């Protein structure tokens, strides 16, 4: 199996996929029917509201979707600029950063005349060239690409799981029991997590090809998220709960109600948002919480603060939080940590958020 160590080879390769990308995507935004100026799109969106934020691994960017999750936007904290990189139905629902922060994986949906079902294309956005690179031809069903630290890219095409090298060459395939939209590769590049036809989380061993179910219970699961050390998953349930799973032992821990989970750099702390709604619609209170992977030590970081968050994720180094207010504005704030009790020696427990900065004003 051939593996390469850097996604930068995308920028040097002479593969036909790269040539195709540069020919098809005339601008940094792909709307399915041609390129559109990113600057024009942003300037025309004075009332734009956001969702689903995430720091780049190097902390230089914050990626976010619009409230309808039909577009993806990059915010630069250094110069306070925002550019749109994609416009596609549900294009902002799910995405993944490459470990070096140079690539973003997501999928594009292209409406087809006379059909209710758009074609799907897994793509990679290269921040240095502003090119959208398709990993395969458009298909009826395709999944969101993800990246490992050793230069692998994972995505699904129908019921097939594909593993590609950093140049986009498919180097191995595995058949799943059904189509999985979200099938992230572990940071160490040895496993892929997905939820099977019974909505139970499973692990695909990329060396042996063995598929190991991690649970067998009454819950329906989705959106597995790897810890940085590839030891655990945090998964969401269809009932709005969060659970963590130790992939080596199969132990499952209940974290309670929550959404938009992310891992601290320690691989032991999970951050998430908890939203209390009136009549299931209006936001009564929306907080950012932290909890140990085993469900202990739960802390509300936004307690007694004006700041509220319907979606939030911690930076890769665990020092800052990007979050979206109920009004749809982007904020960030430092994570305050102190001595705390939990699994592991010398654990620094998140106790609160520091002063929050509002990064977007009036949409943009």
Image (cartoon, rainbow, N blue to C red):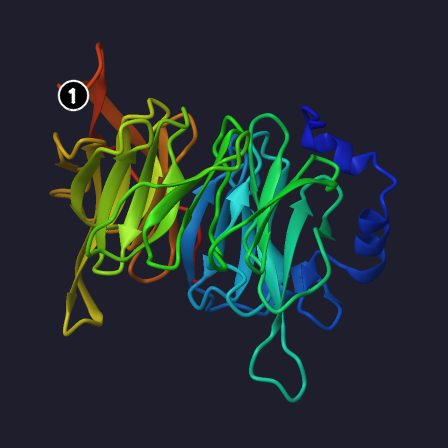
Residue plotted at (56% across, 83% down): 116
On the image, which quarter does residue 251 sit in? top left
User: Residue 258 or 204: which is nearer the viewer?
Assistant: 204
Number of dots carrying numbers: 1
What crowding class fits label 1: few (fewer than 14 Cα within 10 Å), some (14-19), or many (20 or more)? some
**Residue 86, percent across and down?**
62, 60
Residue plotted at (55% across, 57% down): 159
Residue 99 in view: yes
In which quadrant is the N terminus drawn? top right
Q: Is residue 70 above or below residue 305?
A: below
Residue 82 in view: no
On the image, which quarter does residue 349 sit in? top left
Q: Indicate left or right for 312 with 6 as reference.
A: left
Q: Is residue 296 above or below residue 116?
A: above
Name the residue furthest top: 345
Q: Indicate left or right for 69 with 20 as reference.
A: left
Q: Secondary structure at mark 1?
A: loop
**Residue 248, percent across and down?**
32, 27
Q: Which residue is mark 1?
A: 342
**Residue 292, percent across and down?**
20, 30
**Residue 258, percent across and down?**
22, 50
User: Residue 260 or 222: which is nearer the viewer?
Assistant: 222
Residue plotted at (27% across, 44% down): 215
Q: Is residue 43 above or below residue 5?
A: below
């Amino acid at each position: 199996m051939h593996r390469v160590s850097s996604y930068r080879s995308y920028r040097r390769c002479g593969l036909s996929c790269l040539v195709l990308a540069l020919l098809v995507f005339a601008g940094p935004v792909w709307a399915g029917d041609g390129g559109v100026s990113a600057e024009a799109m942003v300037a025309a969106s004075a009332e734009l509201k956001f969702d689903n934020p995430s720091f780049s691994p190097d902390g230089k960017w914050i990626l976010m979707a619009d409230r309808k999750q039909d577009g993806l936007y990059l915010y630069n904290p250094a110069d306070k600029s925002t550019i749109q990189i994609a416009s596609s139905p549900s294009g902002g629902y799910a995405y993944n950063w490459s470990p070096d922060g140079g690539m973003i994986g997501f999928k594009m949906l292209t409406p087809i005349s006379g059909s209710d079902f758009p074609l799907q294309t897994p793509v990679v956005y290269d921040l240095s060239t502003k090119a959208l690179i398709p990993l395969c031809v458009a298909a009826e069903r395709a999944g969101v690409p993800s990246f490992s630290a050793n230069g692998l890219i994972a995505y699904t095409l129908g019921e097939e799981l594909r593993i590609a090298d950093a140049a986009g060459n498919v180097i191995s395939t595995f058949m799943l029991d059904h189509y999985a939209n979200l099938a992230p590769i572990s940071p160490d590049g040895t496993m892929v997590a997905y939820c099977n036809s019974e909505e139970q989380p499973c692990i695909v061993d990329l060396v042996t090809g063995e598929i190991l179910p991690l649970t067998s219970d009454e819950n329906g699961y989705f959106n597995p998220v790897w810890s940085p050390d590839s030891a655990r998953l945090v998964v969401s349930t269809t009932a709005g709960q969060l659970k963590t799973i130790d992939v080596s032992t199969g132990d499952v821990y209940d974290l309670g109600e929550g959404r938009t989970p992310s891992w601290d750099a320690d691989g032991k702390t999970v951050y998430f948002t908890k939203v209390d709604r009136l009549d299931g619609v209006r936001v009564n209170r929306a907080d950012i919480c932290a909890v140990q992977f085993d469900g202990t030590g739960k802390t509300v970081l936004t307690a007694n603060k004006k700041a509220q968050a319907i979606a939030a994720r911690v930076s890769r180094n665990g020092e800052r939080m990007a979050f979206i207010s109920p009004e749809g504005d982007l904020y960030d704030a430092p994570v305050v940590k102190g001595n705390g009790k939990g699994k592991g020696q010398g654990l620094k427990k998140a106790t609160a958020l520091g002063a929050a900065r509002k990064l977007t004003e009036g949409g943009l």
